[in-house]
Amino acid sequence: MSKIKCNHCHLEFEENIMIKENDLNFCCKGCQGVYHLLKNDGLDSFYEKLGNKTIAPPIELNNDDISKFDSLNFLDNYVSATNEGFSQIDLIIEGIHCAACIWLNEKILYDTKGIVEANINFTTNKARIIWDDEKLKLSEIILKIRSIGYNAYAYDSSVADVQASKAKRDYFIRMMVAVVCSMNIMMLSVAKYTGFFTGISKEVKDMIHIGEFLLSTPVLFYSGWIFFKGAYYGLKNRMINMDFLVSTGATSTYIYSLFILFGAKGESYFDSVSMIITFVLVGKYLEVIGKKSAIDTLDKIKSTLPLEAVVIKDNQRKVVALNSLNIGDIIEIKAGEKVPVDGKIVFGSGSFDESTLTGESIPIYKKVNDTVYSGTINIDSLVQFEVTKSFKNSTFSSIVALLEDSLNSKPAIQTKAAEISKGFSITILSLAFATFVVWYFFGLDLGFDYEGTDTFERSFIVAVSVVVIACPCALALATPMASLIGISELAKKGLLFKEAKFIETLASANCVVFDKTGTLTKGELSVVKARFLDENIYKIQLLYSLLNASKHPVSISIKKYLESKYENLEIKNLQNVKNIEAKGMSAIYKNIEDKEFEIIGGNVELLREFEINYKFDSSKTVYLFVINKKVIATFELEDKIKDDAKEIIEYLQNKNIDVVMLTGDNEQVASKIAKELNIKKYFAKQTPVSKANFIKELKKENKIVVMVGDGVNDSVALTNSDVAVAMGSSADISLAVSDIVLLNSTLKSLKEAFEISNKTYKYIKQNLSLSIIYNIVTIPLAMAGYVIPLIAALSMSLSSLMVVLNSLRIKMK
């Protein structure tokens, strides 16, 4: 019977089950209904966008649950109100497969009266819908989505966690069932194999066969279900995969063993069935627990921005949602608030913390006509600025968009085992079938004979031997077993590898790119030189009190320095404390005798403002403390290089790995750090976007790039690298998008990561070589009839044991 395509989902079905309508064909009434709905609504261009892609047929739902979407409890938990008075909800759209699905859902939602906004993220299938609840109910929105063959439910981050935990638990239970049953089967097998050489009665042997049968059955059909499922989907996509070979080898061995159990001559191999499933399932489980948990990374980034801004118009202040801001609007932000969109200052001046963009901890002073960037923090003053870019096109939003693209397009790196096994399964099955045919039709002519067996049984035994002896246990175990031991060794050193595949990539890397601040340097200002012109403890306490009134990084660093130098410092009650933007602070102190002291602390510009002529030259950050026009103390601060930075740079250079430093800091600072660390290639004044572009250019040169950084400013570059390494003290976003986390935040552990990864990768290659050589030697012997299934199973187990023992060498010094 010929197959034809459904006009809606484009899937192929037998012609006799199709619903005919003139020259149209539909696989079900759901597809027929959606097709006509799209035609009637003028949305039939969906099929042009879909092209040759296929989609799932419409989900059949009875809509019995639709009333819950309008219940007060549901609305309170999942629906929020916008500033304009509309309702907003985040939904997960189930059934989305491609960009055409996104277009269709957005189109039909926007065409629905009452919908204000509908944006769907292709990466997460999350839809943010804003609607007027006076014109439209939430249940009607859900029904609209369902009417075109998709389903929707409220987004809940805990649901994703539950689903991930459920998958991990399912694999663990299946694996433990397989391990426990296999251990018991092997105990029975010891008796059987011993009896094979020393003699065993038929009754005892039958009892052992029954015991093995009872234990291997749940292993094959419960624990091994995932392999049958994988084989099914492989066949559905016209691909013979490793799952198919595992399930075929295990099932054929199981069937043959049943044949022996019910009276045929020969040996049963239920133990082989159990071992095939157990060994490969362990590898599968390692993959599951190795996958990184990056749920809702983009939402975490977006949540760092405010949801609204204060707009000044006609001397009136009005709170407006960020999406509603227009170019030319005047925005007001107070001290401590984040800049919501890019703009140009029109009133006021102040210091801005741009660490989210540049990674640099030292605030930047901005005045009228200077540009401020979204995501940065106004530290110390009231500022008004004119919007120059919409929220969608602002710096921080652009970073989010780039990050989203990077996460969506990050390439999967194939392991050596996957590369070798591409044609392995189909080759083995072909050889097994050819072996059966030759033995069945020509075996006797070739001089081969198995005493006491008929032609079919003899041919079947030899063919099964080929499948069993070539079972990909060793090949499948080669990578995960070495990776497991490597990852456990790495974990002992404070190194978290979120996926085992990054061991191979790190071992193959030929270029390492470092961020400066917080990576090669400590990421915080430290006092490197202090000079006290008057060390009277009373005056030191006045300095300590002034520092305590400020949250500026310089003040915090000097305060820590004083606390380490002096004990039990007392905080004095200062009056008229003032913050002078980007310069420092001033205050008045009155003692018990009512004597007044004018105290100031800050940079040289602050002293000039108070008409104090004091010359102080330094390339470092400077802080001067003055009482009544007299300088009492001077401090010089800088960001120090980490103790182990030079060691890791030398190690990489000795391994002929290119080292590059990217920093948002100025040329002078970058040059100084690069010189101290002997880094030849460095680039200053780098933005998050330019860092990401630099990584992309390196990859175009066929470089395998490792990016080491911390902070939100490094997140885009991290996601564009082959391996993203973040410090354990990094921002949450960097940790979320990283592949490797240095939990102790030391660069010494990065060196250990390279050493252990290289060692692990070396043994992975050895394991693969061992399994290939094993197959090259044993498969021809099995095809020639020199290896019965019993020996094949033992040989297969031996190959797996060799892989395990070789992998254990990773632990050796």
Image (cartoon, rainbow, N blue to C red):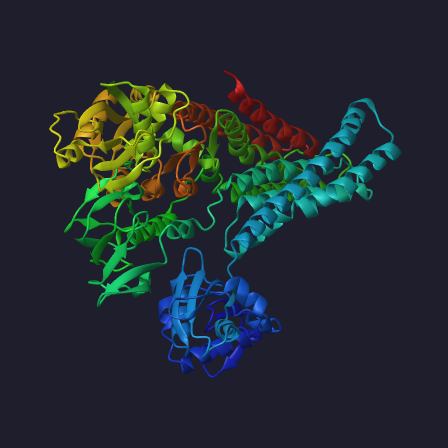
Residue ranking furthest to the front? 593
In the rendering, at what x and y percent does residue 100 appear? 39, 66
Camera-side residue of 48 and 557: 557
Residue 694: x %, y % from top left: 24, 40
Res 667 → quadrant: top left
Can residue 514 be seen by looking at this rendering? Answer: no
- Please name whichever residue, 681 or 524, is drawn nearer the observer in this view of the structure: 524
Report x, y in % for residue 572: 35, 31
The percent position of residue 619, horizontal first and vertical second, equals 17, 26
Number of marks present in the image shown: 0
Instruction: Tell me the quarter of the image containing the N terminus.
Output: bottom right
Q: Residue furthest top?
A: 813
Please tell me whether residue 97 is drawn above or below residue 527 in the rendered image: below
Which residue is nearer to you in this view: 206 or 749? 749
The residue at the point 41 percent across, 43 percent down is 412
- Camera-side residue: 559 or 180? 559
Side of 268 where 724 appears, left or right:
left
| Residue under the image location 22 percent in, 42 percent down | 581
Q: Is residue 804 left or right of residue 649?
A: right
| 663 horizontally vs 442: left or right | left
Q: Would you identify the image quadrant in which residue 15 lies?
A: bottom right
Residue 737 in view here: yes
Instruction: Reply above or below: 363 against 682.
Output: below
